[in-house]
Image (cartoon, grey):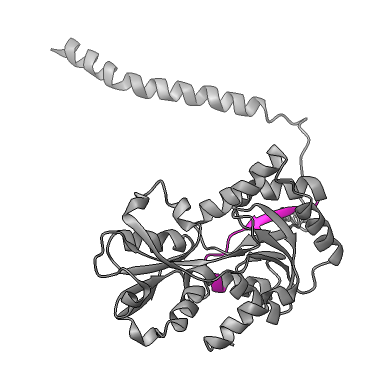
Amino acid sequence: MRAGLNMRFAAERSPARLLAAVLLVVCALVCAGCGDDEPVVRVDLNKRERLMLPQPKEAITYAYLPQYSHTISFQRHRALLEYLRTTTGLPLRQIFPDTFEEHIKMVERGEIDISYSNPFVYIRLAEAGATAFARSVEPSGKPDFRGQVICRSDNPTITKLADCEGKRWVAVDPGSAGGYLFPLGLFYDHGIRLRDFAEVDFAPGPGGKQEKVVLAVHAGAYDIGTIRKGTLDVVAKKIHLDDIRVLAETRPYPGWVYAAREGLDPDIVKAVAKAMFALDGNDPGQEAILKAAGMRGIIPARDLDYDPVRELAHKLGLD
């Protein structure tokens, strides 16, 4: 009985002995490293060096008005930005405003140096001192574009523009040219006013609003929608385009425009414009750059090119 207790006592104490041995070895090693001949390092806390966070390199900011999602905006202009950086040697960087209104405010505050926007947004930017210097040539080969009125192909109540009266309308944004204001002018020309619609809503959320209009009409949430011509190609992989009918198209208006913010160095604008105008649609590599951006080419622009848009704004009471 006593022998059994002794064995149990020894077993219980063996872990404690092992721990004590380990501590003795550690203390010995520590003491060995603390000899009297070790130099003392004194720290003077009165001498301090201020650490600076790395600052981002200065860049020339470039923004595409967010008519589509940020992903599509990036994909469309990524190759063009790379071409411009390589050709001009300038540090161009694409940034992504969430809304049309944010884009405008950022240009006004000097946060966007080069703006690529629709003509209605441009005439507002021009009032804040921005200057047009280039405009895009559409895939059609013309430097203008149109808006479209769409509905579901199987909607038997809408076969002509007059049938839109009393219907639910979803548009892109109050500042969208092809997706709202051009079609609004078309409705006005046919005697249809905003009060004649049962409902007028705008696509929700940041970016991607052109696609959202098509998807809302396709889902039957609205009777009609308005988009810029070319949007249906963007959503071709998301829906069957046979389900959508283009009910009407607006007259052509001057196309999307590149504008420099007020105060941007004229030499920068000249360098960027020269590189843009040099893009050749007959060169396979450069054709791919233009095609990705939804363009056939880029040509010079003047502010007076956008007077037809100002006239439409006056007709709609927007000036």
Q: Quadrant of the C terminus?
A: bottom right
User: Does residue 91 belong to the magenta stretch?
Assistant: yes
Q: Nearer the viewer, residue 107 or 14?
A: 107
User: Does residue 13 belong to the magenta stretch?
Assistant: no
Q: Nearer the viewer, residue 62 or 223?
A: 223
State the image coordinates of residue 234 (x, y, percent, origin top left). 47, 52
Q: Is residue 57 above or below residue 217?
A: above
Q: Residue at x 59, y 50 (%)?
A: 76
Q: Residue furthest right?
A: 267
Q: Residue at x 67, y 66 (%)?
A: 257
State the image coordinates of residue 217 (x, y, percent, origin top left). 33, 63
State the image coordinates of residue 112 (x, y, percent, origin top left). 68, 66
Left or right: 284 in relation to 164: right
Give the quarter of the image for residue 224. Answer: bottom left
Left or right: 189 in relation to 117: left
Give the quarter of the image for residue 13. Answer: top left
| Highlighted range, magenta | 90-101
Q: Residue furthest top?
A: 3
Q: Residue at x 50, y 57 (%)?
A: 230
Q: Is residue 79 above or below residue 216?
A: above
Left or right: 236 in relation to 70: left
State the image coordinates of residue 237 (x, y, percent, origin top left). 40, 46
> Could one spot residue 318 in this view of the protein?
no
Q: Quadrant of the N terminus?
A: top left
Q: Residue furthest left?
A: 1
Give the quarter of the image for residue 62. Answer: bottom right
